[in-house]
Amino acid sequence: MTQFKSGYIAIVGRANAGKSTLLNSLIQQKISIVSPKPQTTRENILGIWTEEGYQMIFVDTPGALVPKNQLGSLMAKNIENAIDGVDCILLVIDGHDGIKNADLDLVVKYSKTDIPLVVAVTKTDISQPEKLMEQLSKLNAYPKIREVFALSARKNKGVEELKEHLKTYLTDDKMYFEADEVTDKSERFLVCEIIREKALLLLDKEIPHGIGIELNKMIYNELKNSWLIDANIITEKSTHKAIILGKQGSMIKSIGTYAREAIEKFLNAKVNLQLWVKIKEDWRNSNFVLTEIGYSKKD
């Protein structure tokens, strides 16, 4: 019988490199929200893949950033915490955007650790092959990189090959999570993330950084197999509140419609979703508000 192997793999990289899309593809379920907006991921999220003989625990992290407020500092700390004690670092680079100096700086940074470093160059389905090969050649100068994979997480191309390779770095022999668990996050957290994802996709560029989701109620009616979910969209400015609400409430209705459909699919039940907009000035610098809406303080 093959010995059971398990371990943790940190997924790191610049904002919008495709980390969350790759995590969802690796575990074949959507647990990490995605959007074209920077700083979509704020908290480390575990994605757990269990099969016969293996358990791989992926840690999806926020995009590398220079903190500008307390929330940014928490996000930066999350990245630092994610690589502590992992079996492998998976650095994700946007192949369509091209390998930038900021990506190479991350290669240098993670090469200084004793943790095996693997690079995944994503979005190859929308990259020109000749330009991609030219970009990949830049990575040849870094001997600490164990392997480079060019893949498309969105189309699930090259993902299984990457997963098979990552198994070679697993060092533990215990099962950390039950076989049917796919994440460490609660339903409440994931519901808030779904609402935020839909808001990110619909709102103007400058607003998403300044919104958070606060869950007021999440009540299940077993007889009707339905949920009552009441939540606040937190914003910092009255001008942003007006945009989130939209003309005659059109924007918040759209956010609510898309979020409700996604939550119903996630919970496999009917959902009555009620959304409100609340102003909490400078909430991203308030430890009280950050804790209140689920961004726990890191040591």
Image (spheres, helix red, strand yellow):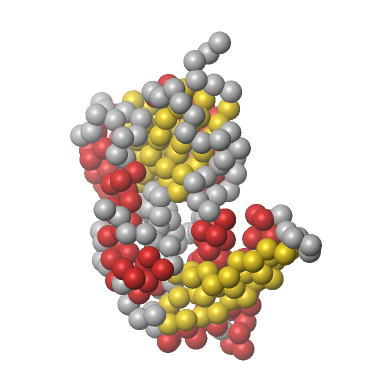
Would residue 95 appear left or right of 48 to someone viewing this image? left
In the displayed image of the protein, which residue is found farthest to the top?
A: 1
Q: Nearer the viewer, residue 79 or 217?
A: 217
Residue 246 position within the rendered picture, expressed as x and y whole percent measured from the top left: 56, 83
The image shows residue 25, relative to residue 148, as above or below, that is below
The image shows residue 169, relative to residue 252, as above or below, that is above
Would residue 271 appear left or right of 196 to someone viewing this image? right
In the displayed image of the protein, which residue is found farthest to the bottom?
A: 248
Residue 154 position within the rendered picture, expressed as x and y whole percent measured from the top left: 56, 45
Q: Nearer the viewer, residue 8 or 178?
A: 178
| Residue at the image position 64 percent from the left and 60 percent from the top | 263
Residue 113 position within the rendered picture, expressed as x and y whole percent measured from the top left: 23, 33
| Residue at the image position 61 percent from the left and 85 percent from the top | 249
Residue 81 position within the rendered picture, expressed as x and y whole percent measured from the top left: 30, 46
| Residue at the image position 31 percent from the left and 35 percent from the top | 85
In this rendering, does residue 208 appear at all? no
The image quadrant where one finds the N terminus is: top right
Would residue 283 appear left or right of 213 to someone viewing this image? left
